[in-house]
Every structure is written in C-alpha cells, then in structure tokens.
Amino acid sequence: MPEHKMITIDGIRVRAEDEARYRRRTAPSEGGQAPPLTAAQADPRARADEEEDGGEGFDPAEHTVLQVIAHLAEADEGETARVLDAEAGGEKRKGLLERREEFLDEARQRAAGGSGGGA
C-alpha cells in the first residue's frame, strides 16, 4: 500500500496531493471566514463530487467495492439499479454483481419504510 505524506492545515490532516483542492474548498470569501465543510467534504467516503462527475452522479468505476456498497446502503431503488448497471457495463466486480438482487431488495425495503438489512 502506498505511503501518503500528510500535512496539517488548520488542524485537519490532508494528503499532500490534495492540498490545493482542500484550500480551494475552504478558502475564505471576501473578508470573511472559511465556509463550513459540507458533509461530502467532511466524510471522504461519501465523496460524490458532482462537479467532478459533471453532474452524472455516482460512478462506481471511480470507487472501491466498499465505497460502492456504502453508497448503495443509502441509495433508492432507481439509483441502486443505475449504479449496478454501470458496474455491469464497466468494472464487472463479482462482489457487487452477485449481490444485485440483495441490494435492490434493501433499497425497496428502505423505500417502504422497513428496517432493511445491512450490506
């Protein structure tokens, strides 16, 4: 596993290669303080940067299997189907495609207000 050099900016550890991106997002507006972090900025696992995706939404090819599963754990049925279709047309990772019906059933249960299972 590659070793990343970390830097600390205002008490937040950031990978050195992400410094410019972090500073752009947290730069203070004219004469004010830096805006608060959004949920996506605060939790890199939930990163679905629509500005980077061109507004297309979550692309499973750009994420690990665990990140895709985390996204599917909160997605509705339509989004779950879209992500799994994209996976089937791209990476074709067995750990995701073999569980297609399980993911869709969980999305249906969430929509119906059920407790849903864990991924």
Image (cartoon, rainbow, N blue to C red):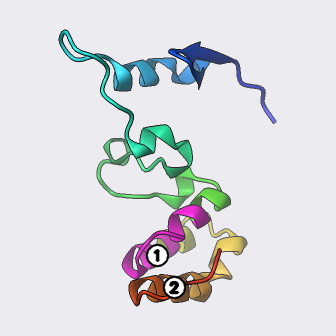
The quarter of the picture where the N terminus appears is top right
Label 1: element kind: helix
* Residue 75, picture quadrant: bottom left
Amino acid at dot 2: Leu
The answer to which of 105 and 9 lies nearer the viewer is 9
| Image position of 73 with respect to 58: above or below | below
Residue at position x 64%, y 55% in the image:
64
In contact (CB < 8 Å): disc 1 and disc 2: yes
Sequence order check, earlier mark of 1 and 2:
1
Question: Horizontal placement of 29 versus 41: left or right?
Answer: left
| Image position of 102 with respect to 21: above or below | below
Amino acid at dot 1: Thr
Question: Horizontal placement of 4 versus 109: left or right?
Answer: right
Q: Which mark is residue 104?
A: 2
Position in image of residue 89 (x %, y %): 52, 71
The answer to which of 9 and 94 lies nearer the viewer is 9
Position in image of residue 17 (x %, y %): 57, 21
| Image position of 116 with respect to 22: above or below | below
Q: Is residue 74 magenta?
A: yes
Residue at position x 51%, y 85% in the image:
104
Q: Which mark is residue 68?
A: none
Which residue is identified by label 1? 80
How many numbered marks are there? 2
Residue at position x 48%, y 82% in the image:
107
Part of the protein shown in magenta: 69-84
Question: Horizontal placement of 32 versus 34: left or right?
Answer: left
Residue at position x 66%, y 61% in the image:
65
* Residue 57, picture quadrant: bottom left
